[in-house]
Amino acid sequence: QKFGSVFVNSSPGGGDILLDHAVTGKVTPDTLSDIPVGEHVISVAKDGFVSAPDSLVTMVQEDETDTLEFILLVPNFGSLKVTSNVDGATICLDNQPKTESTPHVFFNNIPVGTHIVSVFKEGYSIDNPAKEIVNIVTQDTAEVNFTIDPAEVGKSVGNITLDFELEDDYNIWHRLYAYRGFVIIINFWATDCPNCMKELPYLQQFYSDYLADSLIIFGINYHEDLEIIQQTRDNLQLAFTLLRDMDSAVKNSYDLPGTPVTFILDRGGRIYYYLEGFKESWMGNLRQKLDELFAK
């Protein structure tokens, strides 16, 4: 009888090697020697892992050594490939920026389930769809691609706003650019601004009406303590995100003439509407702009 060999490797190693569905007693990486010439099924098994592929069929040749490679995957994780037409865009997963940028493959480290994926790059807006909903499964790689375009930073319609990262009244940090793909209202307010206090209830009504359509509202308090912000939330029954700009750094960087100031951003991050001050009659204009963005 004639014999050959098979070298079996896996990543990570330490998997039990099976020959024709029988345990050999060897673990990867190792060589199975003295295998009869002909067709054989090789597989690898390791507790807590799923093998990819499940098994391989090899044709053993006399006095030759075949090489087989397996990947051992954690079953609760899958892979994700993110690309963009311009490289170097920061990747966001579930509205949290990652350290990785496009193009990048997250290999077997994205939890199984549904996730929101988007990207951003300084000085760029993003075309629709500006976010993608992906379903991550084990032994598969979801792929998404985004198109980003150069855009000016400013306060005019069509501009993109400056980025910011602020903490809310629940001690959660939010970065503006990580919410590409959502329609966003940014509103600067404080309790010592009478018109701000008049406008906040209208914003809450908008939030209730358009939440299901993916509306995000960032109400930025620009100089008051956490206790005052929380008290305002309770008194006005505000459900949207209230951010703390304690030293007015973001307000000053936006070079605002006064308050309240309200921006509506489209899904690509561009300013769709800009409003200084408050009049009750203007709230109809805000609602109209939201209807346009949500195609109501």
Image (cartoon, rainbow, N blue to C red):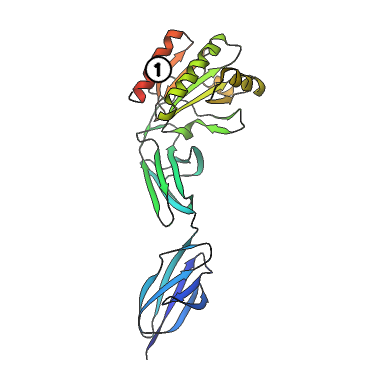
Q: The N terminus is located in which quarter?
A: bottom left
Where does the image place residue 112, in percent across and percent down from the top left?
47, 50
| Residue at image coords 43%, 71% | 43
x, y (%) of residue 129?
Answer: 35, 36
Residue 24 appears anywhere in the view: yes
Compared to residue 135, the image places residue 70 above or below, namely below
Q: Nearer the viewer, residue 287 or 63?
A: 287
In the foreground, 67 or 279: 279
> Residue 162, relative to residue 81: is it above or below?
above
Residue to which mark 1 is pinned: 287
- Where residue 154 sits, quadrant-wise, is top left
Count of numbered badges drawn on the protein: 1
254 sits left or right of 68 in the view: right
| Vertical side of 254 occupied by 22: above or below | below
Q: Which amino acid lies under the numbered mark 1 shown in the image of this protein? A: Arg
Expressed as whole percent of the image width and height from the top left, the position of residue 232 reads 60, 18
The x, y position of residue 139, in whole percent, is 42, 57
Q: Is residue 247 visible?
A: no
| Label 1 residue SS | helix
Seen in the picture, residue 275 relative to 1 is either above or below; the reply is: above
